[in-house]
Each structure stands twice: as structure tokens, then as C-alpha cells.
Image (cartoon, rainbow, N blue to C red):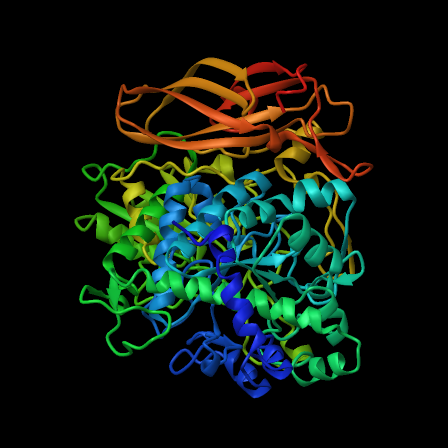
Amino acid sequence: MGISRKHRLNFTKQAKEILQGLTLEEKISLMGGNMTVDDMYQEFIADPDNHHYNMTPIPAGGIEGKGIPPVLFCDGPRGAACGAGQSTCFPVTMLRGATFDRKLERRIGQAIGREIRAYRGNLSGGVCINLPYHPGWGRSQETYGEESYHIGEMGSQLVKGLQREGVIACLKHYAFNQMEYSRFKVNIECDKRTEREVFLPHFKKCIEAGAACVMTAYNKYQGVDCSHHDYLINRVLKEEWGFDGFVISDFAFGVKDTVEAALGGMNIEMCFEQYFGRRLLHAVEAGAVPVEIIDDAALRIIRTLLAFEKAAGAKRHQYYHKENTEDLFLPMHSGRCLEEMIGSPSHRKLALQAAREGITLIKNDGILPLDKKETTRLVVLGRLGNAENTGDRGSSNVWPPYVVTPLRGIKKVAPDIEVVFYPGMNLEHSKRIASQADAVIFTVGYDYLDEGEFTDNEELGIAGLSTGGDRAVELGLHREEVRLIKEVSRVNPNSVVVLFGGNMIMLEEWKEEVGAILMAYYPGMEGGTALGEILFGKVNPSGKLPFVIPKREEDLPEVNWHTEYQWYDYYHGYAKLEKEGKEPDLPFGFGLSYTRFQISDGDFSADKKGITASCTVKNTGGRAGDEVLQLYVGFKNSRIDRPHKLLRGFERITLAPGESIRMSLLCPWEEIKWYNPSTGQFELEHMEYEVYIGTSSARKDLLEGRIKIENAGLG
């Protein structure tokens, strides 16, 4: 089991006893990162041969003589960012969102947790659950998709997996962090319903799952820096949600004022003391910050660290350490060596499984799977064909021992087929070699130069931190890639486009030119293997889009990526398109397979637990496959402005050819309440709800029923 709030609170008495023996200076020392300014600048100057960001855990606090371990921070939504080329690089979070596989995400959390512990870390900064208001956000790849319910469900499993291994799960970035270019200066505003129903529910769900740490965002909300935000941190997070853990700032530039941050609920300034430390001590001595604020922060830190130290020790029957058998966090035993779990075969297999489950087939006119017997010559076109393209190179970067590129993966799966690779610079040459092939695979889309974490290096005085940024110009492919697809597909109709990117990519301009399209996202160190297996039918594709793809970019919310102010509306993604009656190019939750599934015999009911939708799912095709069953609840009869429908349940299932199963999905009443700004409460409407169950958000893929709530006791 993970480290729950109830378990952590058992350490309150011990933590208070330690706290009573600390001086004010010692308490405050727990509230700041242990790096120096010079350390921090060196940390962010990437030198792959000798050093990179977070190569070792980043420390904060800790008093050895008082039995208080330090916080030891390890970044990485797609794996442990530490190490010099040994870590397992999982697919980006967006691809894992496309799996809709809760159990798999928990296992990935456990694997990342084991590797963090092997690096002597005790905290993971990898639970990124910000909601992409607009798919152009450069760090969309670090989260699970556009849907709050889905983000909360998947993020909760990552939390549980990490904390099962004795690693503190840190949620980030709290809150309203959905842009890169302006993240240090933008002030976000929205109405109260948008705040509570769209942008905060997934944070709350992950807190309820037991997350013990929260990282604040760089941006402002309602004119106040998120790291100083009394309303977000003290009132909502700590008081309303009962959060017992500690709050840390985003690195270096998160805290901007000593007194405001301390009073606003900030507990640890990362990753060095700039506004805390001596400044905080002086503020307390001057009476500007009550000593009770310091005591509360120190208690939260000590209690959390004691609970997780104990949890790590409880696993000493599983692992031992090669070198330091006196390590405070990593227990010893005569079993497996914990270091050997870093990049281990079992973890690499897990990365492969995630890529297999997440890569999404979004068009197939019968071209796929390719037949090895009928394919003698294959051409791979595009600059990404042999690129080690695992995602952005900012703080989420992971350094694996190898990366299987698309080209290597195809050759690995089909060693007897002649595979020709060309980046596609010369159009005529591309057409010539394509005309002589049995099929063409286009490898197009984005890499770390196109999107990802962004810092204005010149403004901040940091060299070589990262590139990327938001997709502020357009959301389609590069112009040369569109031309390559259009021209080459005319000489070879057996054309397959493989898209790489962290969020949706516009298709309308070229999708009719090709016979098949796969969305590969950033599929991790074994992504090329999974891609090859899917192309040749060794693996049946089963991913589902965790976002909607519109026909026009104008159908998306308006965002100014270079701004000091941004308003967020209530609607975005598939909910916005449905509300406005606009047909998407591809719906949320959509994904094809090499087999066929039939959904029938829908049944809908309600009791005190919530709404239940049931149906029979049958594999009517000729091969085994996975399907993701989805439950949506509709609000057409609402007396207030609400979405047409929202995802409120999902389950991944595996069926053999001809096999059928009866499935039921439950939507608790809490999931369909609306936030009433007048009462400050979530309320359940007593009306008739539409309930849908099926395989995507598209009406044609759903069975429909209705549930009328007249009994106030139901909810």
C-alpha cells in the first residue's frame, strides 16, 4: 500500500517531539534548498558528457544530528532524471494518458520510485497534472490529456505507485500553469466555476490519493503569485482538502517575497535560499511572520519525511544497497541489489508495454498491418526516422542507456526486409525511392526544438537550459513535411504517416493523401520497437486519443502566448466543440484497432453510490485486442450552463477473437456535481441526466440511456 494521509498522521507525535528540540534557526533551515546560487546555475548548464540537470538528487533541509533526513528531489514525469545514462525512459505522460490503463500507470510509478530510491532520492517531481487549456502548450507532453477527470484518475495511480516504493509524490504545478513563453510573468484569471470544475479537481483527486507534496507554479492567479497564494495554498489545499504534506516552490524563481510566501503557505523554497533562510529568520524576529507559521511548516516537513523513511525501511526484505548499508532511506537485505533496478530489463519491458498500449491508430484504409511476406522493400522518410526523440530536454529529460528509433525498431521487427531511410531533404529523390518501394513510412512531427519547457535564457542569465516553448504559430506539421507527404504519397499510395508530438497535430491539410496514420507521441526508449511491432501487426494498436482534434484551429480557445494576462473560459477541448456544435476531425477517446469491437445491450441505473452504465462488449474480429470502454454523463436539462457531456468513467479490457464480456462502469454522484459560487459548495442537480457508454466521445460510438434523479437521498 502507498503512504496514505492516515499513515502519515501517525507520525505527528514523533515529529512534534523532534520539533520541540529545534531552535528557530534549525526550523527555518528545513524550509530552504541546500544548493548555492552558483550550484544552481551550474546545475542548469547541461554538459551531457560530464553533468546535466538533476544528475544527483537535489537536497533541501535535513538535520542529521536531530534525525531529520533531507528532502532529496528527483525530477522526471517520464522516469528518474538522475544518473548518467542509466535510467529507464518511459513514454511521455501524454502517451500514457492514451493507454487509459490505471494499473499500468501505477506499475510505472512503482518502477520510477524504485529508480529514484536507487539514486538515493526520496521525492519525485514527476506528477505533472496541469490541464492543457490549449494544445499548443509546450509542456502538454508532461500531462495526461485535456480532460480533468482523466488526468485525476491517471495521476492518482502514479501517486500511489511512487509512494508504494517509499518515494514522496509531488504534484505540479499548482495551479493554472498552461503556457511556457509567459510562465514567469502571466496573470491567469477565470470565474469561480471554471476554477473549481475545470482546473482544480484533478489536483484534489491526487491529494485524496495520498500525494504528500505539492509544487506551486511560476505564474500568478488572480493577481497573486501562486507561491504566495493564501487562497490556493492555505484555504483550498490545506484547509478544504485537508492536505497534511508540505508545499515547495518551483525552482529558483518561484518565491518572490519572504513575508508573502511564508504567510501564503509556502513551506520550502527550492532549490536554494534566496527569500527564506536568513531573510525569513529576520522576518520572524521582526514580527512580520509569526513563529507558528514556521512551526507548521517544520512539522509538515518532519512528519512527512519520517513517514517515508519508515516506509522505505519497511521494504528491506526486497532490496539491499551495494555501497552504503547505513543509508537512511534505502534498506539493506541479502536479496536483489536496488541499483540493479535502474534501467533494469523489467523496467524496460514496462516502458515497451506502455508504448504498445499508447500508440494510437487514427486512420487505416486497410494498409496496416504490413505483411512481411508481401513487403520486400520499405522506405522510411522524414527527419525523425532515426532520431532519438523522447521528448523535450528541459527538467523532464531522462537519460537512458539507449533509445530505439523508428528505423531501428522497424529493422528489429522485420530483419529480412530491405529498409531504406532518407530524411527527405530532396523531394525528387524522396519520390524516386518511394516509387520503388512496397510501402512508405513518413516519420514527421515535433522534437525538443519545436515544443517543451522554455526559459528566456538571456533574461535570466542562464546558458543552455532548454529550447522548445509553446507551439505559438500553428498546430500542423512543418510546411516541408506537408509537402513531402502530399508529393510522395502520389507516387506510392501505400503510405503511412507516423506522427510525433506532445499533443494533437492538425490533420485536415493532408490526411486524405495517405492510407494510414499513427499517433506515436514521444514513445520512450523502446518506442521504436513498439512502432515496428504495430506496423507489422505483431502488436494490435489500442491507444485512444486523450484529446480532441478539431477541423480548424479557430475552434480552439484563444490564447496569447506572449502576455502578462490571460483569461481562461469554462470550455475547452471536446467540451467546447460539442457546446458550440462543431464536428471534430477526430473525437476525444478515439482509436482504431486491427480487430473490431461491438457494443450492445446498454443498461443504465442509479443507486446511492452513483450512476451505473453497463453493456456487452464483443470482439467480432479475427484477432485479440484491447478496447477502452468509456462512460459519459450529459447535462442537457440543466438549469445552468453546463457541458453537453463529460467523461466520467473508463476501463481498459482485453478480449480474444469472438469473446464477449459484460462490463459496468460507475460514476459516483460527486463526479457530476457543479460548483455553486453563491453557496461555495458542490451541488447535485435533481433532473434527468443522459448517460452514454461506448468507445469514444462521438455520438455514433455510444449507447445512450437516461437517469432521472428525483430522490434527494440518491446523491
From what the image shows, is residue 674 above or below residue 303?
A: above
Residue 144 position, x and y percent, is 51, 47
Q: Nearer the viewer, residue 361 or 36?
A: 36
Q: Position of residue 489 (x, y in %)?
A: 42, 42
Query: What residue lies at 40% left-to-right and 71% top-to-bottom?
Result: 82
- Decide which of 253, 308 is in the foreground and name it: 308
Q: Is residue 501 left or right of residue 266?
A: left
Q: Is residue 195 at least partly visible in the picture?
A: yes
Q: For residue 335, what is the image quadrant?
A: bottom left
Front residue of 247 and 48? 247
- Residue 307 rendering spot, x and y as whole percentages: 45, 62
Circle count: 0
Front-most of residues 191 and 391:
191
Residue shown at 67%/31% (left/top)? 673
Left or right: 549 in relation to 199: left
Q: Position of residue 506 (x, y in %)?
A: 57, 43
Residue at left offset 40%, top offset 22%: 663
| Residue 53 seen from this side | no
Decide: is 61 above or below 150: below
> In screen coordinates, is 190 left or right of 325?
right
